[in-house]
């Protein structure tokens, strides 16, 4: 296997979360409390509709130093607003509206200017057309691919239209799947299916990042990882590892 090109030259980790559902918003304050306790700043992929509906909690996140990532305006196929729509089935114009309206929501509601995007559900629903749209907005990065299906094994790299792609990482024992609670715990026949094993797999992976001076980033569903105290146990494993925001990667 080739050597990873680590933009930081030392072990570094980017922690991110996707706020897709009302239950993720419910978990938001708990998550912010935990991040504050462990002094970790994270990337938060947020939906324009939620920013407009819950400005205060998003503002608190910004005030506490977290980075907002544009995660589209309605998050197709979110059951609240876009149940029958899929991001990869939208026309170029419709994708553009989704991204631009989310950008506007963050700016108008929070006076926050996003510089990066994550495709809703990414992976299979991510399309090449996104990069041109992001470039038009002056964005710097996208984090919409899976490390296992992207060049460079989780190393960020210049994609196209001047946009850096920061692929979402896997874990030590499951290198061909995104390490998230969906793959590991929730889907039919999950890889792990157990909260304690999930935390253990995370901590083993982090040990490897530290040992080999790698850069790795994951995303998690807030409602899922605050449950059963998983997040706090994971944050403890991050102790001593440099954590970074995506805006520092580009
Ligand atoms: Zn999402």
Image (cartoon, rainbow, N blue to C red):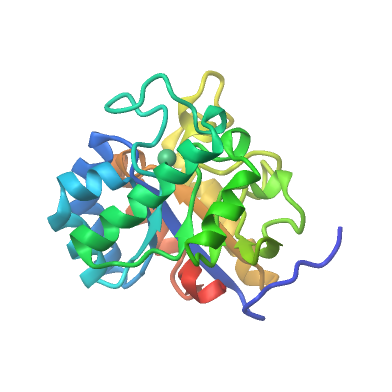
- Looking at the image, residue 93 sits to the left or right of residue 149; the answer is left
The quarter of the image holding the N terminus is bottom right
Residue reaching furthest to the left: 56
Residue 61 visible, this angle: yes
Q: Position of residue 3 (x, y in %)?
A: 82, 67
Residue reaching furthest to the front: 93
**Relative vertical location of residue 185 with respect to residue 12 in this rendering, above or below:** above
Ligand 1's quadrant is: top left
Identified at 31% across, 69% down, the residue is: 38
Residue 197 visible, this angle: no
**Relative vertical location of residue 20 with respect to residue 213 in this rendering, above or below:** above
Viewer-side residue, 154 vs 249: 249
- Looking at the image, residue 7 sits to the left or right of residue 78; the answer is right
Q: Position of residue 207 (x, y in %)?
A: 59, 63
Viewer-side residue, 224 vs 16: 16
- Looking at the image, residue 128 sits to the left or right of residue 186; the answer is right
Give the quarter of the image for residue 39: bottom left
Identified at 53% across, 34% down, the residue is: 184
Residue reaching furthest to the bottom: 9
The quarter of the image holding the C terminus is bottom right
Q: Position of residue 77 (x, y in %)?
A: 41, 27
**Relative vertical location of residue 29 with respect to residue 192 in this rendering, above or below:** below
Q: Position of residue 58 (x, y in %)?
A: 22, 57
Identified at 50% across, 36% down, the residue is: 121
Give the quarter of the image for residue 209: bottom right
**Relative vertical location of residue 26 with respect to residue 243 in this rendering, above or below:** above
């Amino acid at each position: 296997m080739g050597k990873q090109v680590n933009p930081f030259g030392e072990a570094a980790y980017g922690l991110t979360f996707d706020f897709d559902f009302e239950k993720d918003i419910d978990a938001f304050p708990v998550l912010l409390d935990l991040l504050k306790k462990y002094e970790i700043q994270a990337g938060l992929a947020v939906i324009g509709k939620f920013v407009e509906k819950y400005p205060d909690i998003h503002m608190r996140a910004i005030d506490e130093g977290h980075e907002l990532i544009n995660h589209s305006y309605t998050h197709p196929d979110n059951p609240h607003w876009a149940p029958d729509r899929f991001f990869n089935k939208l026309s170029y114009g419709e994708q553009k509206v989704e991204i631009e309206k989310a950008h506007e929501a963050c700016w108008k509601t929070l006076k926050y200017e996003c510089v990066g995007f994550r495709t809703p559900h990414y992976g299979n629903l991510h399309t090449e057309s996104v990069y041109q749209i992001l470039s038009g907005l002056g964005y710097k990065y996208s984090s919409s691919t899976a490390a296992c299906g992207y060049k460079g094994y989780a190393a960020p790299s210049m994609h196209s239209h001047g946009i850096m792609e920061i692929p979402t990482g896997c874990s030590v024992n499951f290198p061909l799947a995104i390490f998230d609670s969906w793959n590991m715990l929730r889907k039919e026949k999950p890889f792990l299916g157990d909260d304690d094993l999930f935390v253990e797999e995370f901590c083993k992976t982090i040990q490897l990042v530290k040992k080999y001076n790698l850069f790795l980033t994951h995303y998690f569903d807030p409602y899922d990882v605050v449950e059963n105290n998983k997040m706090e146990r994971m944050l403890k494993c991050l102790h001593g590892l440099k954590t970074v925001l995506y805006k520092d990667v580009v």
